[in-house]
Amino acid sequence: MNQESSLWSDAWRRLLANKAAVAGGIILLVLIFLAIFAPWIAPHSYSYQNLELGAQPPSSEFLLGTDTLGRDLFSRILYGARVSLLVGFVATSVALVIGVSWGIVAGYFGGRIDSVMMRIVDVLYGLPFIIFIILLMVIFGRNIWLLFGAIGAVEWLTMARIVRGQVLTIKTQEYVLAAQAMGVSNIQMFRKHIYPNILGPIAVYATLTIPQVMLLEAFLSFLGLGIQPPMSSWGTLIRYGVESMEEYSWLLIYPGFTFTLTLFALNFFGDGLRDALDPKISSD
Amino acid sequence: MLQVILKRIAIAIPVILIVASLTFFLVRMAPGGPFDAEKVVPPQVMKNLNAVYNLDAPLIIQYRDYMFNLIQGDFGPSFRYPGRSVTEMIFTGLPVTFELAFYAIIVAMIIGSLAGVIAAVKRNTLLDYVPMTIAMIGICMPTFLLGPLLVLYFGIYLEALPVSGWGSLPGDKILPSITLGAAYAAYIARLSRGGMLETLSQDYIRTARAKGLPEHQVIIKHALQGGLVPVVSFLGPAVAGLIGGSFVVETIFQIPGLGRFYVEAAFNRDYTMILGTTIFFSTLIIFFNLLSDVAVLLMNPRARSQT
């Protein structure tokens, strides 16, 4: 137990020493806070239309201006954060569950099971998933939960590979062989020896998957195949921003900036986490 | 070597067939028929329509016919545009998309590998930090944001470049190519920097330096081949991303390419068009993955002897 806590406290120290990662982490915390408390923070309703007002440039009343239907952009970005971050976390969790179980089973049992399972992963890797997600959205309607599931079901492949590799390494360690010789059951073995050792890589990869998932969602929403009104994610806000950017450029610039900043923060934080947890893997 | 390539092809063919079958049944699972959206038609007309499109046959027969035609390169008729075949539409849009993707890759390769190689050679100087920071921005800034921003600045604010179309105005190919290429330039910069850094620390580079070759010759003659291997293995999978990117870029810049046709088909629920393009894109991606794997084998002597 002591060993484990010292690993994590070491990693924590290294993470704090990385300025870009700390900055990314702080931005993320602020965003998550804003997203959770959006109903209390938002100065205006995100859906209330004031057609007489129309599109207003940023002012003290409307911090980031209003859209063509007179809705407060700042409030809409706050509520969009809820959808975008939710997609990021939920879809990543789906990918996590599938990928980690797949990788553990393949790595732990090895042999023929492993080679069949990994062959499947290899084949799936080469497929155009973006097209399949679009196909699913077209066939089964633009349902937000389907979107979560579909994106998650796509992003698990790398996770499965990483976990399998990790499990394969751990499995050949002497302490695991010793435990096996003493007749420790599979479940016990997993809980005591494998799980604590794969936690680090999983945390790292999960952090790096979130921005990819958010990008995918925004991409679909931009094409009009993702989140449907009246709900809006950052992807839909950017889509509307593009439609009216000639006259009202702020409608594109603020949502776009928020989105890029978030991806930046997530990537820097994820990179920092990777360097902190596994100093061996260099960040290319 | 040849054996490896043949083995890869032997895997690719059944994968394409499985993808085609899967897509076929998925599309058939869609609720409602392809003609439901239109105004109510008399049953007799409906029956004739179904007969024309072979929808009255049992599913398994439809599947057999579809796959049989597919092997001959016939993707069937479009549901939305009567009289036009999906094959015909694919080959109208494809050259445009290919041209766009080609320019994008050229932009990405030149900017990306140049920046990456310079960053690696001038490691930990300003020439390393600045391009790598820009690369990070390029990776984080999605295509669907970069494109409109470029349009806003170069097209609307400076009025320097056309903001839509393809081949009808001078210079209208510049912005789409840069938009699509930018993200890849960023990835390639990071990959080539990593690859070069690793290669530059190898013994044979030290030997080349020790025998008195000038630094630029060491880099061009010895380091580049090894250093750019990660870039080549990235190019295959990048094609999948390029296709996704072409959906966005062709939509933003109103380019009549295959990507835009696909997005339109998705909106119009033109099922045969979706089915056909999905199978076509999948085949394309599998083929390019194969190609880049072979290229990597050819470039890396160690991988060659291992297999």
Image: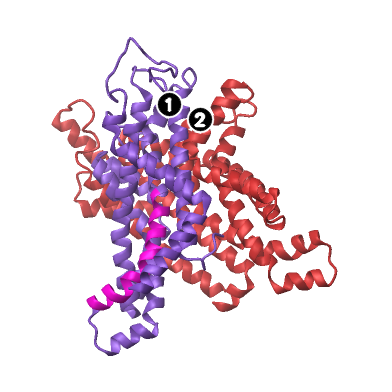
Q: Which residue in the structure is indicated by mark 2?
A: B148
Which tint was used for chain A? purple
Location of the C terminus of chain A by quadrant is bottom right
Q: What residue type is labelled 1?
A: Gly
Mark 1 to mark 2 CA distance (whole Å): 9 Å
Asked if disc 1 and disc 2 are in contact, CB closer than 8 Å, the reply is yes
How has the structure been colored for display?
A: by chain
User: Residue B150's x, y, as percent?
Assistant: 56, 30
Kind of element beneath mark 1 = helix
Q: Which residue is drawn at 71% across and 64% down?
A: B223
Which tint was used for chain B? red
Q: Which residue in the structure is indicated by mark 1?
A: A241
User: Residue B89's x, y, as percent?
Assistant: 44, 38
Q: Which residue range is magenta in the image?
A: A187-210
User: Residue A35's x, y, as percent?
Assistant: 32, 37
Quadrant in the picture for residue A134: top left
Q: What residue type is labelled 2?
A: Pro
